Image: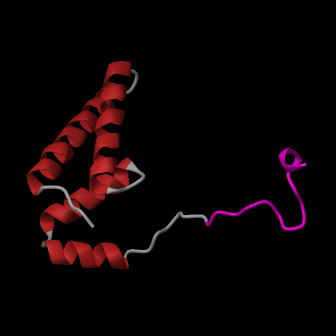
């Protein structure tokens, strides 16, 4: 698993938190919303998470622990919210596959 540099995680987490404060102060401002969403997306990509809140929590854990501890905790962490992929019911074909 590749992990980002701590300095970059720190920088992106600060950016995300700043946009989060701005978003709370002006929720109707579309420019602020765009900045907040962009910073959340960047943090998600950086930390390998699907949700900005999870990415922020992972970034905080990453910054306050050692690398070995972070990797151990991440590998033991349950993957909640994941739904297994399912195909079409057996015995039935879709209309596209006539």
Q: Nearer the viewer, residue 35 or 86?
A: 86
Main SS, magenta region, reads loop
Is residue 29 among what the camera can see?
no
Can you say whether 34 is above or below 7 in the image? above
Name the residue located 32 percent from the left edge and 54 percent from the top edge: 55
Instruction: Give the quadrant of residue 4.
Output: bottom left
Q: Which residues are magenta?
A: 84-98
Q: Is residue 12 left or right of residue 26?
A: left
Instruction: Give the quadrant of residue 32.
Output: top left
Can you say whether 46 is above or below 25 in the image? below
Name the residue located 85 percent from the left edge and 50 percent from the top edge: 97
Q: Is residue 29 magenta?
A: no
Q: Nearer the viewer, residue 94 or 3?
A: 94
Q: Is residue 85 magenta?
A: yes
Can you say whether 52 is above or below 18 in the image? below
Q: How is the image coloured?
A: secondary structure
* Residue 91 placement (x, y as % from top left): 90, 66
Can you say whether 71 is above or below 58 in the image? below
Number of numbered tags placed on the structure image: 0
Name the residue located 24 percent from the left edge and 62 percent from the top edge: 2
* Residue 65 placement (x, y as % from top left): 14, 70
Image quadrant occupied by the N terminus: bottom left
Q: Is residue 26 left or right of residue 4?
A: right
* Residue 46 placement (x, y as % from top left): 27, 51
Residue farthest along the left direction in this orientation:
7
Name the residue located 49 percent from the left edge and 67 percent from the top edge: 80
Is residue 21 among what the camera can see?
yes
């Amino acid at each position: 698993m590749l992990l980002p540099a701590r300095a970059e995680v720190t920088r992106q987490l600060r950016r995300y938190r700043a946009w989060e404060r701005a978003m709370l102060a002006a929720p109707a401002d579309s420019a602020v919303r765009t900045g907040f969403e962009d910073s959340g997306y960047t943090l998600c990509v950086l930390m390998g998470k699907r949700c900005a809140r999870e990415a922020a929590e992972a970034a905080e854990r990453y910054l306050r622990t050692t690398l070995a501890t972070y990797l151990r905790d991440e590998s033991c962490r349950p993957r909640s919210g994941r739904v297994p992929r399912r195909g079409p019911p057996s015995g039935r074909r879709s209309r596209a596959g006539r």
